[in-house]
Image: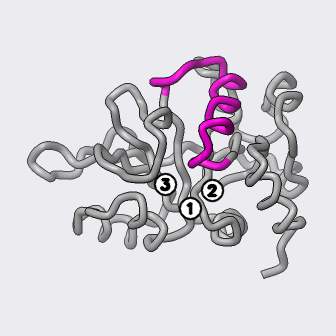
Amino acid sequence: MIWPEDKDGLCQLLAEDNLLLLPTDTVWGLCADATSPVAIQRILSVKGGGTGQGLVVIVSDLDMLKVYVPDLYPRLETLLLLHRRPLTVLYRQVIHLPTSLQGPGKEWAIRLTMDPVLRSLIQGYGKPIIGTAACRYGDPVPLHFGEIRSDILENVDYIAKWRRNEKVPGSPSSIVRLDDRYELDFIRS
């Protein structure tokens, strides 16, 4: 794969708690190291919210997911392998991720990326990243780069150069969780 930018440089920026604005497999996202309390607080500040709002964590593959969700339920693993569009799963129990990433239901939202560029970046970095919509809490999600508010652009440390001119709107991922009977409960399809 021809990488659109300096991947090693982006990994270094992530390691230094910088905020990156990147196209993801859904919409443009505010991205940072998902294991860094400093980076998490910076993203929450840009989004205008505190803890308890929740942030989406993006992993590169099933192997990385299993580091953070060691008891991955087989039905979820099958769904992740077969699903053809971005899917965020809400997990009740994870390890090695800060609780400040949890949403209102005390669940962690984790998505296995389908974007080859983002997958390569996360694999190179070796840790999951936050990939939350590039907007303030309560604002509409920008569906392409041109819709991102200027105050968001001003508060990140790096803005990706690739895919800026695309006008095809992105769309948020589907969201699913396992209910108490271990049945799939689609929150958003």
- At label 2, the amino acid type is Asp
Residue topped by disc 3: 111
The part of the chain drawn in magenta is 33-53
Q: Residue furthest bottom?
A: 1
Residue topped by disc 1: 113
Give how far apart the Cα atoms at labels 2 and 3 are. Answer: 10 Å
Which residue is at a point 32% across and 68% down the rendered structure image?
77
Give how far apart the Cα atoms at labels 1 and 2 are. Answer: 6 Å
Which residue is at a point 60% across and 21% down the rendered structure image?
137
Give how far apart the Cα atoms at labels 3 and 1 are. Answer: 6 Å
- At label 1, the amino acid type is Thr
Q: Is residue 21 visible?
A: no
Which secondary structure, mark 2? Answer: loop
| First along the sequence among labels 2 and 3 | 2
Residue 89 x %, y %: 38, 50
Which secondary structure, mark 1? Answer: loop
Label placed on residue 25:
2
- At label 3, the amino acid type is Arg
Instruction: Classify 10 Å Cα crowding around label 1: few (below 14), some (14-19), many (20 and above).
Output: many
Q: Nearer the viewer, mark 2 or mark 3?
A: 3
Left or right of 111 in this view: 71: left
Q: Are marks 2 and 3 in contact (CB under 8 Å)?
A: yes
